Image (tube, grey):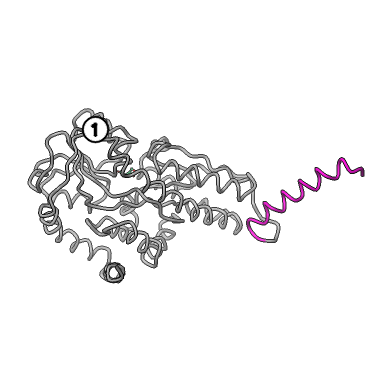
Amino acid sequence: MNKKIQTPLLAATTALLATLGGVGAHAADVQERTIKFGYVAPQQHPQGMGAKKFAELVAQKSGGKLNVKGFSDGQLGGEVQMISASQGGVLEMTAMSTAPLVGVVKEFALFDFPFLFENTKEADAVVDGPVGKALLDKLPARGLVGLCYWENGFRHVTNNKRAITKMEDLDGLKIRTMQNPVYVQMFGALGSNAIPMAFTELYSALETKAVDAQENPYAIIAANKFYEVQKYLTATRHAYSLYVVMAGAKFWDKLSADEKQILQASCNESRDYQRKLSREVDASLLIDLRAKGMAYNELPPAELAKIRAQLKPVVQKFSKEVGEELVNQTFAELQKLRAQK
Ligand code: EAX
């Protein structure tokens, strides 16, 4: 063998070893697979950016064998459809708000409690800690495998009727909510007419005025151009919304230990990137939304306090559904975090 051939061969061997090194010293058990990954937000939204990052990490760690193919904008269906498709083995992976998951694991309602987290530091500590894990652990019994949590963000109300300057302004508003009983009862308790609906139907429901209002983080309002069909934006920050990245159990169970490890490690890495990005863009997106013509206002602290008080019975009711033990554990953790300040 002459030297000219030896060098590229050596380089190839080194590259191969580096790839295998990603999953341990042994030869990795990784097959060629295409993994469809569905989500409802546009590609440029932090949900899409998280999916892109996840795909890159998986490709890198699998030496290009595992090909995660993202489908944005609900191309593979709304959340409820994607849950069924994942359970049925038709869809390999999704990222979605935890809210629609309450239909399969009722304990996820915990994360929909109004005003649960004061800031993202609290949210991260709880969702990445034992409470978040306890909830993920309930998914496999329902045919789903939860890998990690991303951020959707703090939610705010938009509408086409009037500026929300006090609690009473929510009265009678036809508001689209996620398909989740906590949100339906939350807005019901505030006098609104809550209409649960898939995210994929929301823009046209706003456009045709089937509903007056919706609630979402700034990033969704901006990426989905809700400013075209909504006039008023009020910083209610009434709930903090999470995304969960999941695999269908039927797909997951076919994977080797190495493949599972690659997907899990990539999820963890994409999480840090996705949250950072989501938090970085939040403030500037509000500026964009105002520049696009949305009439923005903040609620006086006294009105927010009134809203919180009005929503207490909703929290009490769903605490029973979630289970007092998990709820108490969550509030104990939050208290500990708040005492550390
Ligand atoms: O990310 O349905 C919703 O309002 C959610 O925020 C959705 O997951 C968009």
Question: Which residue occupies 40% across, 43% down?
Answer: 46
For label 1, the SS is: helix
How far across and how far down the image is residue 133, in percent?
41, 64
Residue under pointer 1: 205
How far across and how far down the image is residue 79, in percent?
36, 44
How far across and how far down the image is residue 273, in percent?
46, 50
Magenta segment's dominant SS is helix
All told, the count of numbered labels is 1
Q: Residue furthest right?
A: 1
Q: Is 190 rendered above or below residue 48?
A: below
Q: Is 320 rendered above or below residue 266?
A: below
321 to the left or right of 146: left
Q: Residue furthest left?
A: 168
- Under mark 1, the amino acid is Ala
Is residue 10 covered in magenta? yes
Q: Is 261 rendered above or below residue 234?
A: below
Question: Which residue occupies 17% across, 45% down?
Answer: 298
* Location of residue 255 (image quadrant): bottom right
161 to the left or right of 72: left
Quarter of the figure that contains the N terminus: top right
Ligand 1 is found in which quarter of the picture? Answer: top left
238 to the left or right of 131: left
Quarter of the figure that contains the C terminus: bottom left
Is residue 235 covered in magenta? no
What are the residue bounds of the magenta stretch?
A: 1-24
Q: Is 314 rendered above or below residue 9?
A: below
How far across and how far down the image is residue 60, in percent?
60, 47
Question: Which residue occupies 41% across, 42% down?
Answer: 39
* Location of residue 198 (image quadrant): top left
Question: Which residue occupies 25% across, 29% down?
Answer: 228
